[in-house]
Amino acid sequence: MLNVSVFHPDHFILLGIPGMEDLHLLLSIPFSLMYVVALFGNCTLILVISTNEQLHQPMYIFLGMLTITDVLLCSSAVPKTLSIFWFKSHAILFDCCLVQIFFIHYLFVIESSILLTMAYDRYIAICSPLNYTTIITASFIRRTVLLAIIRAFCIITPLVILLNRLPYNQSNIIPHTYCEHIAMAHRASADITVNSVYGLVAAFSSTGVDMILIVVSYGVIIQTVLRLPNSEARSKAFNTTMSHVCVILLFYLPAFFSFIAHRAGQAKIPPSALILLANLYVIIPPMMNPIIYGIRTREIRQRLAAMLCKNTMRSSFSVFTLGQKIRSS
């Protein structure tokens, strides 16, 4: 019987960003600021949507699911990165590394599914508005969420199983800030062709297909919007559409460039640039999404302003009441 510990080390060592070790503490400043903005912005958006019944509509429910996924996605990678920068906590258990890989890729596929559903929601709302309430129902939302969860699980689980079967008896050092599929696979002392091929198949069958369908949906949406006779309706439709387009570009472009660069550009692109790029797609979209929707969505701006005014008035009343009690005593 072979000893599994020979093939699987107890832990891996995450180097952080090779070649930039002296700048880790400095890099932690923008990373931590972006993470705080992402947490604060998404939690604020969740609070606004959940506490206002007027926003309990399909579009905002999908947006709420997107913000929850954003929080989980950045929280699955950024805290470990900051612990490396701040405390030089480079070690991560082998099983924890696999768990981190699973959740980063799992949440990424789920977020891609949510963006596709939001594109479909906008397609029905603009291209077939009379059928919107009969198509985008509560039952449709539940089925969509369940399908997204099952699809992501079925696609990402084999990825982790394939990593787990590899022997790692040569090196347990990963030049990265968090455990990533290809970075971990390259540490194996065996052929990783199957891992590379399945990684490509998984990426294309999930986010690749989603991206193609989203592009087609928004192509049809833009054509429909341009045909609207009313300029006010055209402007409103464009405003909503452009918010989604900005979010989609922020989500797919960094991930797409990171995916291609790790496979085709390793000889030309410095490792530090590849790792920084890999960090962008887990923190930039969660940071920017609530800002984009908060600025460009009038209903969210109004509800947030109403909540702030209400809390300000309540605080002012509390201070006034306290002052009255002090004076009377």
Image (cartoon, helix red, strand yellow):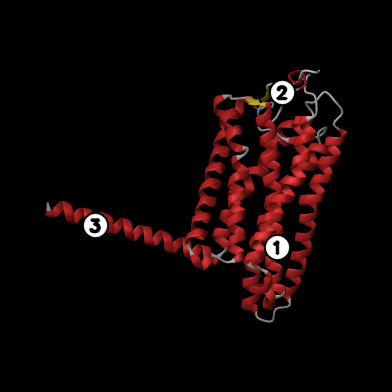
Going 65% across and 81% down the picture, which residue do you hit? 230
Element on which disc 3 rests = helix
Q: Distance between the residues labelled 2 and 3?
A: 61 Å
Residue 171 position by quadrant: top right
Q: Which amino acid does label 3 sit on?
A: Phe
Q: How far apart are marks 2 and 1 (CA)?
A: 41 Å
* Dot 2 or dot 3, earlier in sequence: 2
**Label of residue 320 in the image:** 3
Going 51% across and 48% down the picture, which residue do you hit? 40
Element on which disc 1 rests = helix
Going 50% across and 53% down the picture, which residue do you hit? 44
Image spot of residue 82 (x, y percent):
57, 33
Mark 3 Cα within 10 Å, few/some/many (few <14, many 20+)? few
Residue annotated with mark 2: 173
**Label of residue 40 in the image:** none
The quadrant of the rendering that contains the N terminus is top right
* Dot 1 or dot 3, earlier in sequence: 1
> In this view of the protein, which residue sits in the foreground, 149 or 81?
149
> In this view of the protein, which residue sits in the foreground, 209 or 22?
209
Going 77% across and 69% down the picture, which residue do you hit? 220
* Dot 2 or dot 1, earlier in sequence: 1
Residue 134 visible in the picture: yes
Residue 121 position by quadrant: bottom right
Q: Which amino acid does label 2 sit on?
A: Ile
Q: In the figure, is residue 247 to the left or right of 192?
A: left
Element on which disc 2 rests = strand
> In this view of the protein, which residue sits in the foreground, 181 or 34?
181
Mark 1 Cα within 10 Å, few/some/many (few <14, many 20+)? many
Q: What residue type is labelled 1?
A: Ala
- The vertical placement of 195 against 254, above or below, is above
